[in-house]
Image: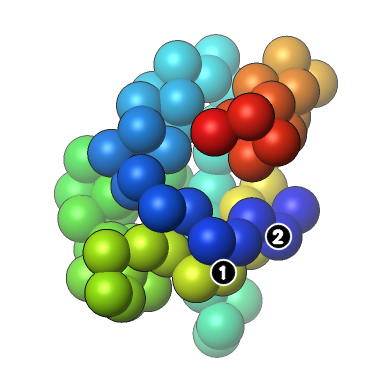
Amino acid sequence: MKVANIKDPDRFFSVVDQCKGKVELVTGEGDRLNLKSKLSQYVSLAKVFSNGEIPEMEIVAYEKEDIDRLVSFMLNG
């Protein structure tokens, strides 16, 4: 799923940390970074973080519960 305009990256990564299964960031080169890893979170922030918000990124979640949690975050903040 594509996510866009994340204005609170700390809150976003808090939601990712609550997920039960894998949540991955798909890079422009097609690589997948495990967003539940703190190191990957820092790497992803360094790559896509701009002006205090994350403009757009593609993430993959494998568990329906996790997808619902991420969609809820995107809709409700």
Quadrant location of residue 62?
top right
Kind of element beneath mark 1: strand
Give the side of residue 3 with respect to residue 36, left or right: right
Name the amino acid, label 1. Answer: Glu
Q: Real-space Cα distance between discs 2 and 1?
A: 7 Å
Residue 60 higher or lower than 45, as above or below: above
Location of mark 1 (residue): 56
Q: Residues within 10 Å of mark 2 (few under 14, many from 20)?
A: few
Residue found at the very far right of the displayed protein: 64
Residue 76 higher or lower than 64, as above or below: below
Query: Residue at coordinates 36% horizontally, 63% vertically from top-left?
Result: 53
Name the amino acid, label 2. Answer: Lys
Query: Residue at coordinates 46% horizontally, 30% vertically from top-left?
Result: 16
| Closer-to-camera residue (1/23) | 1
| Closer-to-camera residue (9/77) | 77
Residue 24, x across and y down, in percent: 54, 48
2 or 1: tag closer to the N-terminus: 2
Q: Are marks 2 and 1 in contact (CB under 8 Å)?
A: yes
Q: Residues within 10 Å of mark 1 (few under 14, many from 20)?
A: few
From this viewpoint, is residue 33 visible? Answer: no
Kind of element beneath mark 2: strand
Query: Residue at coordinates 28% horizontally, 39% vertically from top-left?
Result: 10
Give the side of residue 9 with respect to residue 15, left or right: left
Residue 56, x across and y down, in percent: 56, 69
From this viewpoint, is residue 11 visible? Answer: yes
Residue 67, x across and y down, in percent: 73, 29
Residue 51, x across and y down, in percent: 27, 74
Location of mark 2 (residue): 2
Q: Which mark is residue 48?
A: none
